Image (spheres, rainbow, N blue to C red):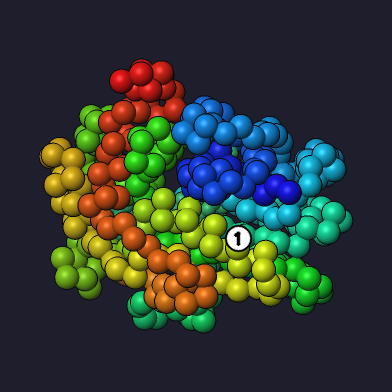
Amino acid sequence: MSILVTGGAGFIGSHTCIDLLESNYEIIVLDNFSNSSPEALDRVRTLSNRNFKIYDVDLLDRENVDQVFKENDIEAVIHFAGLKAVGESVQIPLHYYHNNITGTVILTHIMQKYGVYNLVFSSSATVYGIPDTVPITEDMPLSATNPYGRTKLMIEQILSDLYVSNNKWSIALLRYFNPIGAHESGLIGEDPNGIPNNLMPYITQVAVGKLNEVNVFGSDYSTPDGTGVRDYIHVVDLARGHLKALEKVKSSSGIEAYNLGTGKGYSVLEVIHAFENASGQKISYKIVERRAGDITECYADPTKAERELGWKAEKGIEEMCRDSWNWQSKNPEGYKTESKFFLSR
Ligand code: NAD
Ligand code: UD1
């Protein structure tokens, strides 16, 4: 029996594949490489010393997705595949709705056809919209402020309807906070296309000299230093959360949402200073206007995941910064950097 990992070549997916392989799961990766490189999966093979099947398939391609289920004995799906850039989702909303929502409908339809009812879904803390209070618990009101967020919210609702229709389904909705960091080897990490939107990849690209300085979006928020506060979580901790959720969905039925965060918030300036300490690199920054759509503060109450999944984030901000820097400094061009160079060092 195998675990199908959609979007397994991506940032979070590739780290989760390593954990699955190290825990002796058989895996199958389905990815259309629209936002990732096959090189990431080569490196997953190198790191884990395990082989696995890779399908270069688009989730929107129903026939080929069906073929993946026909050819393999799949017991559960971890569903990462989706587009995730908030700004881009405002520009091309139909593309986001089609890719994320239709892709999930096709996937779950085929899962149902083959009697595969165990699903771990990549949701996001974005489904809490503008939270009234922090820390955020799973039962707080849900809303969305952009098309990307709406795709996550709608998919959560679609999956809830699916469970109501057939209670054989067992679904974990994992609401990630802000994943950063990289595998400690520095072989896999986050490789955004073009200029990064998110804070940590922007900082690391300033550190390697690809960008000049960090634009700090606003210093007049009602936070201790005036800059936005977020719950950054190490991607390796996040990956581990998927294995816990997988065990849970395999052993029960139902649909449950879980916050995957550390429960601790850091401001933009705190992250910049933590990165400087961990890397020894000076990070130039300037304060600019607030970014439209940003919220003041967002951090998780992660106690439900600890109570019901037996999962808790373990890695602190220093380790997150150290590993982000290790990845970026060894791979200044991301996956376009020749891997043999540092494998042989
Ligand atoms: P990523 O872009 O690195 O990985 C997503 C993968 O899905 C990519 O490899 C991409 O090629 C693939 N993909 C996209 N559409 C596809 C399709 N139609 N068919 C097949 N493959 C497709 O993103 P990530 O950071 O690893 O995020 C994984 C998931 O977690 C996404 O669903 C994202 O929305 C969600 N998420 C991410 C964050 C974050 O900050 N990284 C936060 C919350 C939620
Ligand atoms: C963003 C997305 C959110 C998504 C999350 C994780 C937006 C509005 N929201 O959240 O939907 O779930 O990423 O992928 O894009 N910052 C700077 N300078 C920068 C970049 C960021 O000051 O160059 C600040 C932001 O204002 C924020 C913090 O850093 O306070 C974190 O930003 P970011 O990494 O983009 O994540 P979120 O805004 O939390």
- Report the front residue among 248 and 290: 248
Q: Which residue does the image show at 21% across and 71% down from the upper left?
A: 223
**Residue 133, image quadrant:** bottom left
Q: Which residue does the image show at 40% across and 66% down from the upper left?
A: 312
Residue under numbered circle 1: 246
Across and down, in percent, residue 321 comes to: 26, 47
Q: Is residue 331 visible?
A: yes
**Residue 161, image quadrant:** bottom right
In the shown orientation, is residue 257 left or right of residue 260? right
**Helix or strand or loop: what does disc 1 sit on?**
helix
Q: Which residue does the image show at 19% across and 56% down from the upper left?
A: 269
- Report the front residue among 69 and 20: 20
- Tag 1: amino acid: Leu
Query: Ligand 2 falls in which quarter?
Result: bottom left
In the shown orientation, is residue 219 left or right of residue 254? left
| Label 1 beta carbon within 8 A of ligand 1 | no
